Image: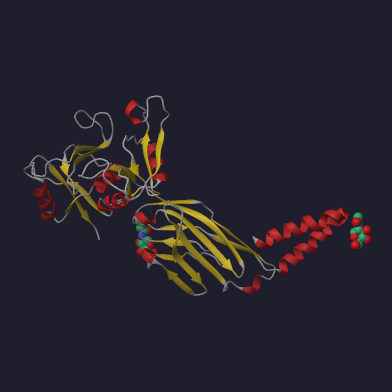
Amino acid sequence: MKSLLFLVLISICCAEPHIGNYTLDHERIIHIQEDDGPLLSVVAEQSKVFSHRGGNVTLPCKFYRESITAGSGTHRIRVKWTKLTSDYLKEVDVFVAMGHHRKSYGNYQDRVFLKEGSSNDASLVITALTLEDYGKYKCEVIEGLEDDTAMVTLDLQGVVFPYFPRLGRYNLNFHEAQQACLDQDSVIASFDQLYEAWRSGLDWCNAGWLSDGSVQYPITKPREPCGGKNTVPGVRNYGFWDKDKSRYDVFCFTSNFNGRFYYLIHPTKLTYDEAVQACLKDGSQIAKVGQIFAAWKLLGYDRCDAGWLADGSVRYPISRPRKRCSPNEAAVRFVGFPDKKHKLYGVYCFRAYN
Ligand SMILES: *[C@@H]1O[C@H](CO)[C@@H](O)[C@H](O)[C@H]1NC(C)=O
Ligand SMILES: *[C@@H]1O[C@H](CO)[C@@H](O)[C@H](O)[C@H]1NC(C)=O
């Protein structure tokens, strides 16, 4: 980039007074430019790639060097992959390669490697994708003083769901909101994920935290208690709030799971404690809220029986709306957080595959 700017400045300052010899001067400048070192450009063929939890993905990145003396080899080239944090304020290290040396960082250890499809390929393969892998990545290639970058977004297939815990509505500060999603086999959703969910029809009249620290809610059917009847549909933004002191609900995101989600066939209705034990006895765990949403959205799971879930809530997933079973919409119906001693419900279990 530095050299390109140099070229442009020279062309302007020196070519103008000798219009007739412009071409000559220009060529001479290009020659100087080449002596100055190769130009490097880094390109991502796709700016967005799509996968799901548990899958593998290639983040594309190629570099091009405009050097006449191309024989210098690629040994001095350094490839660095970083990921932007969800507020886009910082970068965290993912992977670095220089010569034969390779290093991966944090949760990426043993899961990332260079594709090396060709000598100018800096594409990164990530295996066994996690929910946390979602986000924006930066591919940086450095050769001597030259340096260029490209951005790639990794998007995951999945489902966004609004969440509040047994404590009740508007009880979570930002940190508790993050933990509440983790506890339900999910992560706090990004704005882009909530926006996508809104475009697919999500309508929720309670404000929830998002991963960038903002508080928002999606409205597809404007109405009086949700910002006004005469407003346009959209994701309503409350803005950024104090992450320690402000309390809202949260929007969580989850993706495909590697396991089996099912309604336990049991001769009687159960209390919460009996429900937990019944799943254990079946070689499973009581299912989490993220798992009922993933099964419903990604597998079309449909069951018209209210069942306990791990957080003490009672819900049931309907993908084929019918009389007495969520007649008007496909949804995970929320019965509530009943008294845990009430022996009135079944249970949803989850068995992880390894
Ligand atoms: C171009 O440069 C040559 C040699 O420096 C000079 O003789 C000639 O007059 C120049 N032509 C114009 C149009 O300026
Ligand atoms: C992902 O890649 C790993 C290692 O290359 C391989 O063992 C695994 O089968 C792949 N998984 C999928 C879902 O393709």
Q: Which of the pair 142/115 is nearer the observer? A: 142
Place residue 22 in its image quadrant: bottom right
Q: Is residue 104 left or right of residue 276?
A: right
Considering only vertical position in the picture, is 327 above or below 311?
Answer: above
Place residue 215 in its image quadrant: top left
Structure colour scheme: secondary structure
What residue appears at the point 54 percent right and 57 percent down from the top-left corner?
150
In the rendered image, the quadrant that contains the C terminus is bottom left
Q: Is residue 307 left or right of residue 117?
A: left
Q: Is residue 126 visible?
A: yes
Q: Which of the pair 46/344 is nearer the observer? A: 344
Considering only vertical position in the picture, is 69 above or below 195?
Answer: below
Total count of labels: 0
Q: Which of the pair 271/249 is nearer the observer? A: 249
Where residue 46 appears, as percent x and y from the top left, is: 51, 52
Where residue 27 appears, as percent x and y from the top left, is: 79, 61
What residue appears at the point 25 percent right and 48 percent down from the top-left corner?
291
In the rendered image, the quadrant that contains the N terminus is bottom right
Considering only vertical position in the picture, is 77 above or below 56?
Answer: below
Q: Splitting the image into four quadrants, where does ligand 1 fall? A: bottom right
What residue appears at the point 65 percent right and 73 percent down from the top-left corner?
71
Where residue 179 appears, as percent x and y from the top left, is: 28, 53
Q: Is residue 39 left or right of residue 289?
A: right
Considering only vertical position in the picture, is 100 above or below 265?
Answer: below
Q: Is residue 255 visible?
A: no
Q: Is residue 155 left or right of residue 43?
A: left
Where residue 154 appears, as percent x and y from the top left, is: 43, 53
